[in-house]
Amino acid sequence: MAPIDFTITDKPKSQKEWQAEDDAHTLARAEAIRADSSRHQAAKSAAQKMLDDEREDVRLLSKVAGRRAPRKQSGGTATSGGGGFNVGKRI
């Protein structure tokens, strides 16, 4: 049996190359999720729960800091196109 050659012949990847490859994998995973309607719906539901949890954290932290928590805008959802919270805005 011949010995294994551990010589590195390729130059190390740059940060941009690593990021591009990671982004490509991320986009491929997103496409797989979108193609599976039950998985996509589960991800959307999880995102809504995460958002609700974050809203509660902001409310509690605002109370600790002695500031008013952000108020909901009309519409009541945090989607694009109106509605949601005024996070980061002084009210």
Image: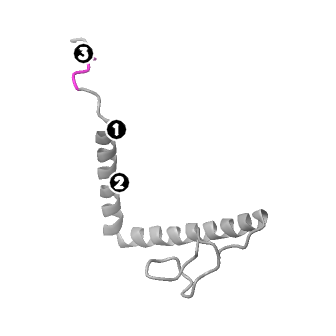
In terms of depth relative to the viewer, which is nearer, 54 or 45? 54
Looking at the image, residue 71 lies above or below residue 64: below
Given this view, does label 2 or label 3 mark the residue nearer the observer? 2
Quarter-of-image position of residue 80: bottom left
Pointer 2 or 3: first along the chain: 3
In terms of depth relative to the viewer, which is nearer, 1 or 32? 32
The N terminus: image quadrant: top left
Left or right, 30 with reference to 68: left
Residue picked out by circle 1: 15
Q: Residue shown at 29%/45% (left/top)?
A: 21
Q: Amino acid at mark 1?
A: Gln
Residue picked out by circle 2: 26
Q: Which residues are magenta?
A: 5-10
Residue picked out by circle 3: 5
Q: Tell me if residue 47 is in the magenta stretch.
A: no
Q: Residue shown at 58%/76% (left/top)?
A: 85
Quarter-of-image position of residue 63: bottom right
Looking at the image, residue 28 lies above or below residue 73: above
Q: Are marks 2 and 3 in contact (CB under 8 Å)?
A: no
Q: How many numbered marks have been drawn onto this rendered protein structure?
A: 3
